[in-house]
Image: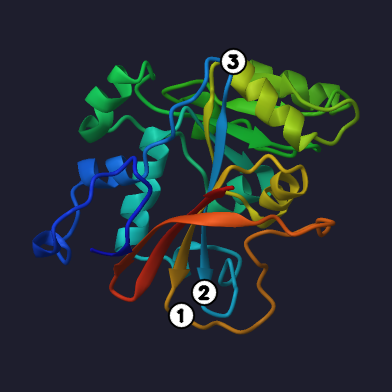
């Protein structure tokens, strides 16, 4: 893996001698470490992949445009987070399972005061989820379901019966994206990672609560009508981010941009 330009000052520079070797998981974790947070602070980062022509998916899934190193970074970002926030449609399409504990990150998580694995938080207005799936019945850390106050009561009961924690983050059926971030942080889940999908990421962008975007640019072209990485209504003024890191491996670019 080769760095194309330095990351922020939080990560020490590396010699050119080791620039083209595969980075260790510890080195990736250092490069993608969350910033220091105030006692009441939180940080929401997104991890997405896009083709050269802007597609976030191929045939409804992100896996076909991903790669081996992208999945190593995907796992690293998860291992650094307190919670992984994901939309219900992505849970259904990608076959989400509970996050697992990884020995390679156990000491780092313990030193940061984190549990063995991040929680998964599923954002849904309809509560149209299969609560018999392992994501709800056998997670290492209880799964959270983030919904609105007017969500169907029978589905809320079903989620709780399956062992999930229901988090109310909206007055109606819909979820207020900014409130969702606050509610999760209030539960001690302050290092937040969202993996989309595009609709959920669009809601976070519109609410101006996204602090960082980790975007993998896949060296592929797909054409077609696939979604971009963020969907939904446009913002009044485009949000400007600053580059923090760019890495390269096998034609893939692994970028990180942070709130200015």
| Element on which disc 3 rests | loop
| Element on which disc 2 rests | strand
Instruction: Report, in whole angstroms, how far the alpha carbon at label 3 lies from the one at label 2.
Output: 36 Å
Quarter placement of the N terminus: bottom left
Q: Is residue 110 above or below residue 125?
A: above
Q: Are marks 1 and 2 in contact (CB under 8 Å)?
A: yes
Tell me where residue 106 sits by quadrant.
top left
Instruction: Give how far across and how far down residue 169 sits, in percent.
Output: 77, 26
Q: Earlier in the sequence, mark 3 or mark 2?
A: 2
Q: Is residue 61 above or below residue 159?
A: below
| Element on which disc 1 rests | loop
Residue at mark 3: 187
Q: Is residue 33 above or below residue 168?
A: below
Instruction: Report, in whole angstroms, how far the alpha carbon at label 3 lies from the one at label 1.
Output: 40 Å
Residue at mark 1: 220
* Residue 179 visible in the picture: yes
Instruction: Give how far across and how far down residue 141 sits, in percent.
Output: 46, 21
Q: Earlier in the sequence, mark 3 or mark 1?
A: 3
Residue at mark 2: 51
């Amino acid at each position: 893996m080769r760095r194309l330009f330095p990351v922020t000052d939080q990560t020490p520079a590396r010699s050119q001698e080791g620039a083209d070797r595969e980075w260790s998981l510890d080195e990736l974790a250092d490069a993608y470490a969350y910033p220091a947070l105030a006692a009441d602070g939180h940080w929401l980062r997104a991890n997405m992949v896009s083709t050269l022509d802007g597609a976030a998916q191929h045939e409804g899934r992100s896996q076909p445009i991903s790669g081996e190193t992208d999945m190593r970074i995907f796992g690293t970002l998860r291992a650094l987070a307190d919670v992984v926030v994901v939309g219900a449609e992505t849970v259904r399409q990608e076959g989400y399972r509970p996050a697992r504990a990884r020995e390679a990150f156990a000491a780092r998580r313990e030193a940061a005061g984190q549990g063995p694995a991040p929680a998964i938080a599923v954002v849904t207005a309809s509560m149209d989820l299969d609560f018999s799936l392992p994501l709800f019945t056998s997670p290492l850390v209880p799964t959270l379901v983030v919904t609105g106050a007017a969500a169907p009561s029978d589905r809320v009961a079903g989620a709780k019966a399956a062992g999930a924690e229901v988090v109310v983050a909206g007055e109606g059926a819909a979820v207020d994206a900014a409130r969702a971030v606050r509610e999760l942080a209030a539960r001690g889940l302050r290092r937040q990672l969202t993996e989309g999908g595009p609709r959920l990421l669009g809601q976070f962008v519109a609410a101006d609560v996204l602090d960082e975007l980790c975007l993998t640019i896949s060296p592929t072209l797909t054409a077609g009508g696939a979604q971009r990485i963020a969907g939904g209504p446009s913002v009044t003024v485009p949000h400007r981010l600053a580059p923090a890191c760019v890495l390269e491996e096998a034609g893939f670019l692994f970028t990180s941009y942070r709130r200015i």
